[in-house]
């Protein structure tokens, strides 16, 4: 059994349509296999499977088919490239599995196009190409903790050793070894003042893998000179849509023409140890193999206006960085991550008997059970406990975001309050004050959102 074709094209809705086919061996059938789709923004940074709403890998049964998948993940930043590969898994023994080759937009298993691309690669690898390393620069993800200013939304240093001048954690992806053809007479002499740095400009050419962008780095392994890509042009061949209902018109990228600037030995990029670039955490890559930010290690940052709201009655400061949010159905929503985002660790000032108790803070900032009969608790409720705690022990409190408990059976559409035992309930209590602390989004899960408390009229 082997992959005979693997293609990725973009739909008219700007999603990614993956299609593959298999060539069975003697006595084999595609019905005996199932398939997972793996993807990444960068081919050197590790692939992760496309998952469903429960974070389980989506599988296509070969006996059911068809061997296609429309990855409903819109592309907003067109400077990012998508790489895919398909994992074939033998149903009878899942230890027997193998991947297809890596494919990406503009790469098709078409005989004529494949032949021309093979000729390009042969030309570079055997005749006039030189061994090089491509180091792709990060353009999104968790920001550098050393040089990035949240308030100003820009780097505060031009030479930062932490991010190598990129503004992002780590800064560059793992090196990719490739053959590149350089112009035979690359030097460009410009008139200049004697104290100005000299930058030689070169033209170079490589195949369609990997796709490169401006500001990516190239290291020539023969002379160890380093270049930054300042401009990229592509040689394309047309490919007409196969299915007007699904696929948009595509161009097949055959080769890439680069304009390079030689780096000054004083530049940050010359100090990058190409053999020991740290691996970017997959969690930093938004579970795509390349970036939405990682949450366990970054430092939340207090932001200034416009994320500070004061309407004369309430003063709200979003005490989290923009890394903590995501677009959900077009709306900006806080990412849910119990134990990191939306939670805070406190010290218990009294015994908290169980989890899922509504809690408040005392004058020392320690956790106590919220009491709706005590008017002094009016503006002290902070969230829902996630554990029990003895006096003096630490306790984790969910302050906002989603919370799931299988023992719940909420009525959708009704708000959630708390009763005299600090338990979550859906009936307002006769109290000194009452407040909405959450709303049910499913029968077994809630969205914690503390509302303004309301005092009972005397």
Image (tube, rainbow, N blue to C red):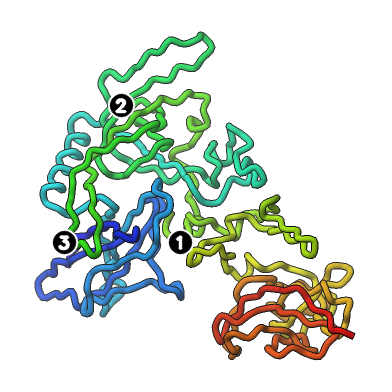
Give the vertical position of 355 relative to 67 (above or below).
below
- Considering the numbered disc 3 on the image, is that residue within a helix, a strand or a loop? strand
Give the vertical position of 229 relative to 391 (above or below).
above
Horizontal side, residue 298 vs residue 280: left or right: right
Where residue 291 appears, x then y in whole percent? 47, 54
Residue that numbered label 1 is attached to: 287
For label 1, count other residues whose C-alpha is less than 10 Å away and answer few (under 14), some (14-19) or many (20+).
many
**Discs 1, 2 touching: Cβ within 8 Å:** no
Instruction: Kindly tell me whether residue 179 is visible in this rendering.
Output: no
Which quadrant: the C terminus? bottom right
Query: Which of the 4 image quadrants contains residue 309?
Result: bottom right
Horizontal side, residue 258 vs residue 125: left or right: right
The mark nearer the N terminus, 3 or 1, is 3
Alpha-carbon span between mark 3 and mark 1: 28 Å
Residue that numbered label 2 is attached to: 203
Identify the residue at image location x=78%, y=82%.
Answer: 434
Identify the residue at image location x=11%, y=51%.
Answer: 111
Where residue 48 appears, x then y in whole percent? 40, 62
Identify the residue at image location x=70%, y=86%.
Answer: 424
The mark nearer the N terminus, 1 or 2, is 2
The mark nearer the N terminus, 3 or 2, is 3
Query: Which of the 4 image quadrants contains residue 294?
Result: bottom right
Residue that numbered label 3 is attached to: 4
Give the vertical position of 272 relative to 382 (above or below).
above
């Amino acid at each position: 059994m082997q992959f005979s074709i693997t293609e990725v094209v973009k739909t008219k809705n700007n999603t990614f349509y993956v299609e593959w086919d298999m060539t069975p061996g003697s006595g084999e059938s595609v019905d005996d296999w199932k398939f997972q789709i793996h993807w990444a923004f960068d081919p050197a940074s590790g692939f992760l499977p496309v998952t469903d709403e429960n974070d389980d890998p989506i599988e296509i049964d070969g006996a059911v088919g068809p061997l296609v998948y429309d990855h409903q993940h819109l592309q907003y930043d067109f400077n990012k490239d998508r790489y895919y590969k398909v994992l074939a898994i033998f149903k009878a023994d899942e230890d027997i599995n193998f991947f297809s080759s890596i494919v990406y937009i503009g790469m098709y298993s078409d005989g004529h196009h494949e032949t021309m691309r093979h000729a390009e690669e042969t030309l570079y690898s055997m005749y006039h190409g030189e061994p090089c390393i491509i180091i792709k620069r990060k353009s999104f993800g968790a920001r550098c903790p050393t040089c990035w200013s949240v308030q100003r939304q820009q780097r505060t240093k031009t030479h930062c050793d932490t991010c190598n001048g990129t503004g992002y954690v780590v800064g560059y992806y793992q090196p990719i070894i490739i053959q590149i053809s350089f112009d035979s007479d690359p030097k460009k002499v410009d008139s200049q003042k004697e104290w100005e740095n000299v930058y030689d400009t070169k033209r170079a050419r490589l195949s369609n893998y990997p796709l490169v962008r401006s500001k990516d780095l190239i290291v020539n392994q023969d002379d160890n000179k380093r270049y930054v890509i300042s401009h990229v042009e592509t040689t394309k061949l047309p490919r007409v849509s196969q299915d007007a209902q699904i696929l948009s018109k595509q161009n097949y990228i055959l080769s890439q023409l680069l304009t390079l600037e030689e780096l000054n030995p004083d530049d940050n990029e010359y100090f990058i140890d190409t053999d020991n670039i740290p691996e970017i955490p997959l969690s930093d890559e938004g579970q795509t193999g390349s970036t939405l930010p990682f949450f366990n290690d970054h430092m939340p940052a207090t932001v200034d206006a416009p994320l500070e709201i004061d309407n004369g009655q309430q003063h709200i400061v979003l005490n989290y960085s923009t890394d903590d949010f995501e677009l959900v159905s077009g709306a900006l929503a806080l990412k849910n991550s119990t134990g990191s985002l939306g939670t805070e660790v406190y010290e218990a000032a009294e015994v908290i008997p169980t989890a899922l108790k509504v809690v408040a803070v005392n004058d020392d900032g320690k956790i106590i059970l919220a009491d709706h009969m005590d008017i002094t608790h009016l503006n002290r409720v902070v969230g829902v406990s996630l554990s029990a705690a003895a006096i003096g022990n630490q306790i984790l409190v969910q302050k906002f975001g989603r919370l799931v408990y299988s023992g719940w059976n909420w009525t959708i559409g009704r708000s959630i309050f708390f009763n005299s035992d600090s338990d979550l309930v859906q009936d307002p209590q006769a109290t000194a004050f009452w407040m909405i602390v959450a709303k049910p989004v499913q029968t077994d899960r809630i969205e914690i959102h503390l509302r303004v408390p309301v005092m009972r009229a005397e």
